[in-house]
Image (cartoon, rainbow, N blue to C red):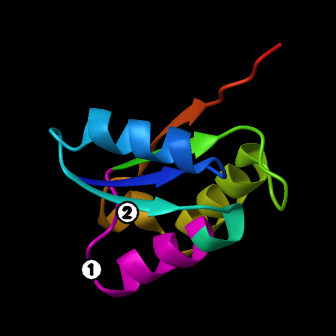
Amino acid sequence: MRILIVDDDPVSLAKLSVLLKKYGECETALSGREAIEKFKKAHENYMPYTLITLDIKMPDMDGQEVLEHIHRWELENKIHEIGERAKVIMVTAVDD
């Protein structure tokens, strides 16, 4: 399984990587834009992500916006017809 972990906080990114590495190959992205680029590149290389964890609150593009981009791209490229769409888990760590 290929896993993309998206979080703008390096500590959260590292913790999720440690937790998920026993389930598959983990890659990380520190922003929503980087996540979208990696997602598309993975498909171009015929190595799509099976699981994506998205931080809900990020400064450049929040997790919901990233998810909308991913779903739109999957629909435009008919991923549901040629393969399985990525599973997405929305995560966040807030102190309030």
Mark 1 is surrounded, within 10 Å at the Cα level, by few (under 14), some (14 to 19) or many (20 or more) other residues, namely few
Q: Residue furthest bottom?
A: 44
In percent of width and height, residue 27 lies at 36, 62
Which residue is the site of mark 2? Answer: 81
Left-right relation of 87 to 9: left
Which residue is the site of mark 1? Answer: 46
Q: Which mark is residue 75?
A: none
Where residue 47 sits, quadrant-wise, is: bottom left
Callout 1: SS: loop
Q: Amino acid at mark 2?
A: Glu
In percent of width and height, residue 89 lies at 51, 34
Q: Is residue 94 above or below residue 34?
A: above
Q: Residue at x 84, y 54 (%)?
A: 59
Q: Residue at x 53, y 39 (%)?
A: 12
Left-right relation of 25 to 87: left
Residue bounds of the magenta highlight: 35-50
